[in-house]
Image: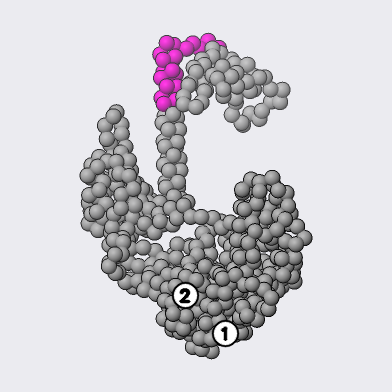
Amino acid sequence: STNWRDAVRQCLGTPSSAPKSPHEPRTREEGSPRGPVLVSPMRGREFFGAIYADKLKRNGQFSDQDVQLTELFCDFVALAYSRLVAIRSKRLAFEQLSTTLDTIRDGVISVDAAGIVTSFNSAAARMLRVDADEILGRSLESAPELKPLIQILISTLRVDSALIKLQHGSFVVTARPIRSDRRPRGVVATLVELDRAQRIAQRVTATRPRYLFADIVGDSQSVQTAIHMARQASSVNATVLITGESGTGKEVFAQAIHTGGPRSSEMFVGVNCAAVPRELLEAELFGYERGAFTGARTEGNQGKFEMAGRGTLLLDEIGDMPLDMQAKLLRVLQERVVVRLGGSQERHVEARVIATTHRNLDALVEAGRFRHDLLYRLRVLHVHLPPLRDRGEDAILLAESFLQRFAREQGKKVRSFSPPVEKALMDCAWPGNVRQLANVIEREVSLLDGDSHTLPALQSPLEGTAATPDPGGDAPLDDPEDTPGRIVPLAEVERRAYLRALNLSAGSVPKAALALGVSKVTFYSKLRSWGMHPKDHN
């Protein structure tokens, strides 16, 4: 009852119009009391009640002893009930705490002032490979394999993200003291596996993919076909190969496939296979263990496959990967496990792989410079991006998109092109494709007066005014002398000379550099400045 007076009224009851059977016990509901009545209130934790008694004989009387015994009985009942409620609440709180600890992914350990383990969740048992039932209630020192953990907890009660190394892994430990009456009564410590801590840090600090399918501009049939294939690829986990000339937007499509699929909330990690030195590529992709090589981090390091987690790994310029690395990559794609450099433990990986290249992989397979089995594994789904010169009026659509973006970024008012500018943009072959177009528009917006609403003319001549084949192809390049009546800029003459030398040398950079009398470093630098990837035929 809500109070003891209500309890008394319930005990007294009201007269009942329906008589009970003589064989049934008599209750107060059957009528008015037939003698003196004694009601003693009973108050306990979370309840109110009363004890009711009356004399069946009319001449009966309650003594002072009866009253005292009744009150004492009420106190005992209330105390017993309150203890039952407290025990039940304590048991419920303990069960809730135990369930909460077991649902935490981090390991949680608590010990009292004597070093006795008072709690040990299942995550800690899994990480430390200790049976929780065997260590609960015992000293932490009874497990000698946990000596580094014991030492750090004994040395100081407060620990902030300390790294400890045990026989079966490295862990990040954080500990706080348990205090009562301003005195330490023990310590609570949390453990996080180092690999997981690194993944969390990388997820927080990593750059998120910027591009969506909505960011891809183009109405031509070839681009729409590529977008359709990419959308299908985004909904499945199969490996995707994206091909196309340099500057056609391969990474844009790769990011759109990631952001348009179920893995969009996971990591997107990219590695340029052509930019990483051969000696470091294996460590970059698969990671390395402690002491694997000179200069390695003391705790080892996870590779890009592990870093990507359940997200997406972009292997950019896969055609430049060395043959020995191709064999190792093939095994990872088939078995879905990696072995760190200098280690022996296999680690399961779940990252979805997207590979891109500007090279003709079928030709590389015929030349013996790319594994055919790896090509089949990579080309489960194939998205080919056409060059900008084959996309018709997409050049104008892209130019308008870039114009609006750069004008907004630079605070300019320009919003359109004059007809001569549109014609020049349409007539250009764009050897650097979309990347070159973006650079041209950014340059023109930067040089334009801030009050202009229309781009009247191009401040600098365009490179590739004729349909120049891609330097990676086999078609001959035109000489400057082949265009009568036109003065060719010196920069264009130099570019054509480099590309012709490369073409006549069958793609061999050393031979082309020797023929021009320049170093290989200079030759590579020139190609990169034009937005092209060198073809290394060594």
Q: Look at the numbered disc 2 and give the secondary structure of its residue.
A: helix
Residue at the location (52% across, 23% down)? 49
| Residue 226 makes an appearance in the image | no
Residue at the image position 77 percent from the left and 60 percent from the top: 419
Q: Residue furthest right?
A: 419
Mark 1 surroundings: few (<14), some (14-19) or many (≥20) residues within 10 A: some
- Please, what secondary structure does the residue beneath circle 1 have? helix
Answer left or right for 62 relative to 129. Answer: right
Residue range in magenta is 58-79
Q: Amino acid at mark 1?
A: Asp
Q: Nearer the viewer, mark 1 or mark 2?
A: 2
Q: Which residue is mark 1?
A: 362
Looking at the image, residue 303 sits to the left or right of residue 480; the answer is left
Q: Is residue 489 left or right of residue 110?
A: right
Frontmost residue, 335 versus 118 = 335
Mark 2 lies on residue: 523
The mark found on residue 216 in the picture is none
Q: CA distance from mark 1 to mark 2?
A: 26 Å
Question: Quadrant where the N terminus lies?
Answer: top right
- Indicate the quadrant where residue 293 lies: bottom left
Q: Is residue 224 magenta?
A: no
Seen at 43% across and 77% down, the residue is: 518
**Rendered image coloring scheme:** one colour
Q: Is residue 20 above or below residue 94?
A: above
Q: Amino acid at mark 2?
A: Phe
Between discs 1 and 2, the one toward the N terminus? 1
Q: Nearer the viewer, residue 234 or 226?
A: 226
